[in-house]
């Protein structure tokens, strides 16, 4: 399983915002902290806003903040929402061209592995990946105010 850069960046934005509590944060701040292209983050932020994870405030003193509580953001659900293609192999998709799909045992093994991966992610929330004892170190590493 490979998580796309889009999901990775989305999770990083949520982590950053969770560390900031209710303070408004700009895309530039997140871009600078993670050294990620501002253009990449703009698409991520737009989608996170559309999906109701964050709220954005326009204007001179605008920015964004987490709209949901970190305890309410399940990592497994989030990955399913942000990943457009969880097909590990061609035979997972309709119209597979693989000649052995009807009798291949590999598809079942990969399906089981994918389910195990997602089941593990379902056990965790954004709050779980931000334990209190690590927050000061995360704040320092991200050079947050």
Image (cartoon, rainbow, N blue to C red):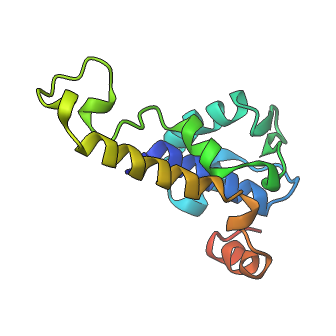
Single out the residue that lies furthest toward the left.
99
Q: Quadrant of residue 137?
A: bottom right
Q: Which of 25 and 6 is in front in this view?
A: 6
- Residue 69 appears in the picture as rendered: yes
Q: Residue at x 85, y 58 (%)?
A: 21
**From what the image shows, is residue 21 above or below residue 51?**
below
Q: Quadrant of residue 56?
A: top right
Q: In this view, does 4 lie to the left or right of 60?
A: left
Q: Which of 129 and 25 is in front in this view?
A: 129
Residue 134 position within the rendered picture, expressed as x and y whole percent measured from the top left = 71, 79
Residue 28 position within the rendered picture, expressed as x and y whole percent measured from the top left = 63, 49
Q: Is residue 76 left or right of residue 100?
A: right
Q: Which residue is drawn at 74% across and 54% down?
A: 17
- Residue 3 appears in the picture as rendered: no
Residue 68 position within the rendered picture, expressed as x and y whole percent measured from the top left = 82, 44
Q: Which residue is drawn at 81% across and 55% down?
A: 71
Single out the residue that lies furthest toward the right.
22
Count of numbered tags: 0
Residue 23 position within the rendered picture, expressed as x and y whole percent measured from the top left = 86, 53
Image quadrant holding the C terminus, namely bottom right
**From what the image shows, is residue 46 above or below residue 14?**
above
Single out the residue that lies furthest toward the front.
103
Q: Which of 4 and 118 is in front in this view?
A: 118
Q: In this view, does 31 lie to the left or right of 99?
A: right
Q: Residue at x 74, y 48 (%)?
A: 73
**From what the image shows, is residue 22 above or below residue 82?**
below
């Amino acid at each position: 399983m490979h998580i796309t850069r889009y999901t990775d960046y989305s999770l990083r934005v949520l982590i950053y915002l969770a560390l900031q509590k209710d303070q408004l944060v700009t895309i530039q701040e997140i871009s600078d902290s993670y050294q990620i292209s501002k253009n990449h983050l703009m698409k991520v932020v737009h989608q996170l806003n559309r999906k109701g994870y964050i709220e954005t405030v326009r204007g001179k003193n605008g920015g964004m903040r987490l709209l949901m509580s970190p305890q309410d953001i399940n990592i497994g659900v989030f990955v399913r929402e942000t990943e457009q293609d969880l097909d590990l192999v061609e035979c997972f998709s309709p119209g597979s061209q693989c000649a052995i799909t009807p009798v291949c045992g590999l598809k079942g093994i990969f399906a089981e592995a994918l389910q195990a991966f997602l089941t593990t992610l379902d056990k965790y929330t954004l709050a779980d990946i931000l334990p209190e004892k690590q927050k000061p170190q995360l704040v320092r590493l991200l050079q947050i105010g």
